Amino acid sequence: MAETNTHTGALTVQVYTADGALPLANANVLITSNSGSGEELVRVLKTDRSGKTTPISLAAPPAVNSLDPENSNARFYRYNIRVDYPGYYTTENLNVPIFEGQTSIQPVAMIPLPADEERGKRITAVETEPNL
């Protein structure tokens, strides 16, 4: 019988525009993870009037894995975040790290579509491995 992972971290997504000056309320936020069979939907959220999602709990490897740089076990799990908002490019943040016992705050800067552009265009940012 497979052992269930009981280790978790938390994630809050903060969505804004105008270089952080304007929060975007009611943005659609999709959290996914990569599994052996492809991308798997984890949660669908909406931002509040301050542009933030409520913190959600996500699976993470044990914190002890991060203490030893020689440890070959995963130090964090990676999640993908996609944000949609009418009139803006869809923005994707890939490989966002989640650590056990930590709350990650992922800022997402939304860029308005030019007046002649159609909805559905994407901007993708791939996160690099954190310095531990």
Image: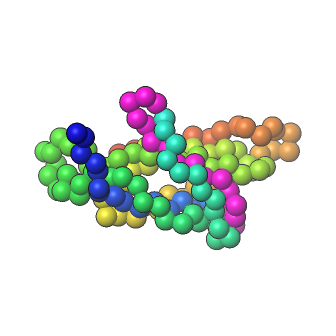
- Quarter the C terminus occupies: bottom left
**x, y percent for residue 50:** 64, 71
Q: Is residue 77 magenta?
A: no
**x, y percent for residue 92:** 57, 44
The residue at 54%/59% (across/down) is 13
Q: Is residue 27 magenta?
A: yes
Q: Is residue 130 visible?
A: no
User: Most prominent secondary structure in the magenta stretch?
Assistant: strand
Q: Which is more toward the observer, 107 or 52?
A: 52
Q: How many marks?
A: 0
Range drawn in magenta: 21-38
54 relative to 70, above or below: below
Colour treatment of the image: rainbow
**x, y percent for residue 24:** 69, 62
Furthest residue toward front: 1
Image check: 16 left or right of 117? left
The residue at 77%/40% (across/down) is 119
Image check: 80 left or right of 70? right
The residue at 23%/58% (across/down) is 63
Q: Which is more toward the observer, 12 or 37?
A: 37
**x, y percent for residue 74:** 25, 44
In the figure, residue 8 lies in which quadrant?
A: bottom left
Furthest residue toward top: 37
Image check: 44 left or right of 106? right
In the figure, residue 90 lies in which quadrant?
A: top right
Furthest residue toward bottom: 50
Image check: 68 left or right of 62? left
- Quarter the N terminus occupies: top left
Q: Is residue 77 visible?
A: yes
